[in-house]
Image (spheres, rainbow, N blue to C red):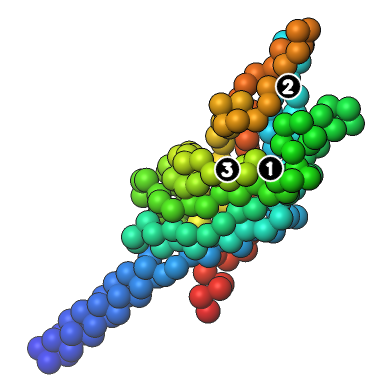
């Protein structure tokens, strides 16, 4: 009986060590978030004295690599500058020609390089993502709040931040009659399948 009990204890310890090692390995895996246009929305909101303008941009491409155990991150998210659409032909023509100059600066990019806060290997986390935001031919250092959800079969990312476009050198579209905000709110929502698929 003593030998049997001892054998069970040894077996239990071995199983525990194997499970612990598997969990640690899983948490150390590199998580890959592949962004696709069909599952990504990039919306903007601009206020003026008469009403609030809502619009959207299209995603061009995006891939972010992230290690939850170390918070190491790299990658790039690229948005089509010329796709900006607020639902008004005249307003959008002015936005592309005079403000974004999208014929010359065709892409808006974000290159993440640091995560502040802990991202759970499984579950929902709220963190700060630091990186370089490229727009209108220049790069700007920013830190944006992000909600990240990682699950065995899917991932989701929600980001909201403010772009001080006038401060960053773009033209103020305000006129004597119409005054608009000098900042624009950006909301990105993206999701995808198993974030560990690329590692298999």
For image coordinates 71% across by 12% down, the residue present is 179
Which residue is tagged 1?
Answer: 42
**SS state under label 2:** loop
Which residue is tagged 3?
Answer: 138
Residue in front for this viewpoint, 116 or 153: 116
Please report whichever mark, 1 or 2, sits nearer to the chain's N-terminal start: 1
Query: Can you tell which of label 1 and label 3 is closer to the viewer?
Result: 3
Question: Going by the image, does 111 lie left or right of 39?
Answer: left
Residue 79 in the image: state x and y as whole percent. Answer: 68, 49
Q: CA distance from mark 1 to mark 2?
A: 21 Å
Residue in front for this viewpoint, 72 or 138: 138
Please report whichever mark, 3 or 2, sits nearer to the chain's N-terminal start: 3
Name of the residue lying farthest toward the left: 2
For image coordinates 75% across by 8% down, the residue present is 176
Residue 198 in the image: state x and y as whole percent. Answer: 56, 73
Question: Going by the image, does 36 lie left or right of 114?
Answer: right
Residue in front for this viewpoint, 125 or 97: 97
Please report whichever mark, 1 or 3, sits nearer to the chain's N-terminal start: 1
**SS state under label 1:** strand
Which residue is tagged 2?
Answer: 173
For image coordinates 63% across by 37% down, the residue present is 187
Please rate how many residues cluster around mark 2, counting C-alpha atoms within 10 Å: few if below 14, some from 14 to 19, many from 20: some
CB within 8 Å, label 1 to label 2 = no
**SS state under label 3:** strand
Residue in front for this viewpoint, 8 or 74: 74
């Amino acid at each position: 009986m003593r030998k049997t009990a001892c054998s069970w204890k040894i077996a239990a310890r071995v199983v525990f060590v194997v499970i612990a090692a598997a969990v640690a390995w899983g948490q150390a895996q590199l998580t890959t978030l592949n962004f696709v246009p069909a599952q990504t929305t990039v919306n903007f909101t601009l206020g003026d004295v008469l009403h609030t303008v809502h619009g959207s941009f299209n995603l061009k491409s995006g891939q972010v690599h992230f290690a939850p155990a170390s918070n190491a991150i790299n990658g790039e998210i690229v948005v089509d500058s010329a796709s900006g659409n607020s639902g008004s032909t005249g307003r959008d023509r002015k936005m592309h020609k005079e403000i974004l100059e999208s014929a010359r600066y065709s892409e808006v990019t974000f290159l993440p390089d640091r995560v502040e806060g802990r991202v759970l290997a499984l579950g929902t986390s709220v963190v700060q993502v630091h990186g370089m935001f490229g727009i209108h031919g220049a790069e700007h250092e920013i830190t944006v709040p992000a909600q990240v959800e990682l699950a065995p079969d899917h991932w989701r990312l929600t980001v909201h931040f403010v772009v001080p476009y006038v401060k960053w050198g773009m033209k103020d579209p305000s006129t004597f009659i119409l005054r608009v905000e000098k900042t624009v709110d950006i909301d990105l929502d993206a999701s995808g399948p198993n974030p560990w698929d690329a590692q298999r």
